[in-house]
Image: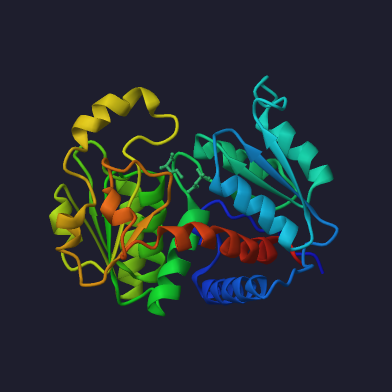
Amino acid sequence: MTRDKRDFLILGDIPVADWPGVFERTAALKASRARGERGGTLAGKSIALVFEKASTRTRVSFEVGVFDLGGHAVVITSQGSQIARGEPIEDTARVLSGYCHAIMLRTFGHDRVTALARAAKVPVINGLTDQHHPCQVAADLFTVRERRGRIDGLRYAWIGDGNNMAASWIEAAGMFGLDLALACPEGYRPDPALVAEAHARQAALGRGSIAISSDPRDAARGADVVSTDVWASMGQEDEAAARQVAFAGYCVDAALMALAAPGALVLHCLPAHRGEEISGDVIDGPQSAVWDQAENRLHVQKAILEYLVAP
Ligand code: CP
Ligand code: NVA
């Protein structure tokens, strides 16, 4: 029996009920890799990894993950392909669908990944758009689960830009009924429609909260998990100077962490700018989970690839 193809463009493309299984599989894949075992669930399958923006973690974790599962990864960058010369993304989707069993895309506007997914015959994975970063927040949630044994019943803080990462965290808060407090400067708050949608999901669940303020101390107070990200994301390089001014005071440093719950975890998707959104002593200190968080990209994406692609 054939099934409709599954895409993973936003966190909610994997239903809430399926996430416990994805996380259990992630833990099993992580443990088997630690034992030196390799899998074969992608044997005979090729996965296209398409990059229209720079990457270290996404590029390497997907390429190694596909290798670990016995498949073959094909990395394409916009400059090294016909994409930068203007070939429509839909044509790229049709052509890659004839060669590959899934396509991962890192790009600018989210409309590009949805257009790719509409035209592709194979599953499409969002490896970051300007609006969402679901693979990263999946790894972040897995890291919290690994460190705390659960993701619910904890207080989460987001300090900084209402960007792609913040959007995927808001989506997670809606899906799982999490208590999430965001501190974002005026003018850099998340999309109100996304927040309203997450609030509606929480109301239906009967748990969770999403609060947005402009005071990092309000957000951090009592938090079990404190997350942040760069002040200027990829594609916003021209705004960097203005953002340095707007985000002054939005640094996850020891003083801010002193307000969080004792032993609170610190997350950062990386790359980080020490001395801007996070201080060196915090990111390199005992509360930081960022290296596990980065490694977990590999394990969770293998579970997601199996979920979408493996028979
Ligand atoms: N966190 C993350 O997506 O890192 P890269 O930009 O290096 O892929
Ligand atoms: N918000 C950052 C995340 C990088 C992984 C960006 O989009 O550049």
Specify the farthest residue to the right: 44
Q: Position of residue 64 (x, y in %)?
A: 68, 55
Q: Tell me if residue 32 comes above or below residue 308 in the rendering.
A: below
The percent position of residue 283, horizontal first and vertical second, equals: 33, 54
Residue 16 in view (yes/no) = yes
The residue at the point 51 percent across, 34 percent down is 108
Residue at (68% x, 50% y) in the render: 63
Which quadrant of the figure has residue 67?
Answer: bottom right
Q: Residue at x 41, y 58 (%)?
A: 290
Residue lying at 47% horizontally and 63% vertically, measured from the top left: 292
Q: Quadrant of the C terminus?
A: bottom right
Place of residue 112 in the rendered image (x, y in percent of width and height, measured from the top left):
57, 36
The N terminus is located in which quarter? bottom right
Q: Is residue 118 left or right of residue 281?
A: right
Q: Nearer the viewer, residue 196 or 13?
A: 13
Name the foreground residue: 109 vs 73. Answer: 73
Q: Residue furthest bottom?
A: 149
81 versus 27 height, above or below: above
- Specify the farthest residue to the top: 85
Q: Is residue 70 left or right of residue 25?
A: right
Residue nearest the observer in this picture, 111 or 106: 106
Q: Position of residue 306 (x, y in %)?
A: 69, 65
